[in-house]
Amino acid sequence: MASIGDLRVNGKRLRESLERMARIGATSGGGVHRLALSDEDKEARDLFVKWLKDIGLKVTIDEMGNIFGKRAGRSNDLAPVMSGSHMDSQPQGGRFDGILGVMATLEVLRTLYENNISTERPIVIVNWCNEEGSRFSPAMVGSGVWAGALDRDWVYNRTDIDGKRFEDELIRIGYKGREPCVRHPTYCYYEYHIEQGPILEREKKIIGVPKGIVGIHWYDIYLEGEANQVGPTPMEGRRDALCAAAEMILKVNTLPQRVGGNLVATVGEIQNYPNSRNIIPSKVHFTVDIRSWDDDHAQRAWEMLRQDFEQIALRRGCPMQIEDTWNVSHSPFDKSLVERIFRISTTLGYPSLYMVSGAGHDASYMNQVCPTAMIFVPSVGGRSHVEVEMTKWEDCEAGANVLLHAIIQSANEKDKIGPSIQ
Ligand SMILES: [Zn+2]
């Protein structure tokens, strides 16, 4: 090896690690079913911990079941560089979501280990507990508690569909560790993940460089109608809450087209009362999810939608109530780290693209704690959270090489304050 810049990960070994992990909870359709705190999750964790110890990492497990592996640096009083993701999956999920970021960080550390390369700062690999939130909601609780955004005991008492408590299941699989789950000084955080969308494939790029995570705006709409027998009640004069909702839902669907710019809008949940074929619907509740990188644009779009809703509600004689349920502004990642990812990708010869993440990740919480950036690679057909989820092996390797050099560069920075902290 002529210089550190020539260093590359072992793509074959990365593939073998991913394939080995994909056998744990493998489904007949080629995916994995590895729900948080299940027997499969335990099996994957046991193997992961063994692999960490094989390369001499100091393993700690905290009281939320997050697993950390620390590789010492030359100056161990300096805050470490952290990188990782999650190993749990969606039900009947894919072989790449989450696990790619964990296995690629492991591959980076194996590469440093076998080449005897030391860094100034320590490096920490992390597997965050219950990122998916499909067995125990909400999502991203491991990083959320660690970052101080969620309460540990509240998460402990969350239950799955069978009434099993989070904490009891954590104890059952042997991963309620002794370390307190509190944030440690961290120099920066990288998370490498599949894109889960179609943009990189469409644009024929290999590396996606998210500038941050989109703003997410949630609203709950409540409509009042008038219940009546469907047979004897003539059509004119009806106050049918479901018909009002139907018109509104189509307004949501066409909103992005009407306002232009970068925005998506979705109604994902609806309740109709009394939900009987015999009774004109008297009450409807539905949700609206608007996501955009541009908070002002999202706000303007919502104002327009609200006027549409008001007109429809008035015309159909259905009084409406709107609740502003949740509103998070767009969350830009650390600019210098984002630019670093792009620069490294270019240097390594990978076509790359600045983009935004439309989904939440553990990186969302880490972005509140320390300078954070992500690396995306293409999802074949833009598909994710399904058994056919696929990323080409050479793309997996490409992203791992970008991660390798991003970690090395950050881990060799000596200044204690770190890159700009937002
Ligand atoms: Zn994920």
Image (cartoon, helix red, strand yellow):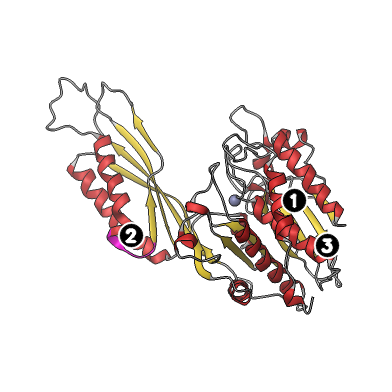
- Location of the C terminus (image quadrant): bottom right
What number is the disc on residue 181? 1
Q: Residue at x 79, y 44 (%)?
A: 47
Q: Is residue 379 above or below residue 76?
A: above
Q: Quadrant of residue 34?
A: top right
Residue occupying image coordinates x 54% and y 57%:
195
Nearest the eye: 27 or 238: 27
Q: Position of residue 213 (x, y in %)?
A: 52, 61
Q: Quadrant of the N terminus?
A: bottom right
Q: Position of residue 339 (x, y in %)?
A: 59, 75
Magenta span of residues:
258-262
From this view, report whether residue 415 is shown above or below residue 58: below
Residue 71: mark: 3
Query: Nearest the camera: 103 or 293?
Result: 103
Task: For marks 2 and 3, give the CA distance.
Answer: 48 Å
Examine the structure image and report whether residue 21 is included in the region drawn in magenta: no
Question: Residue 92, which numbered label?
Answer: none
Query: Quarter of the image holding residue 269?
Result: top left
Query: What secondary structure predominates along the stretch shown in magenta?
Result: loop
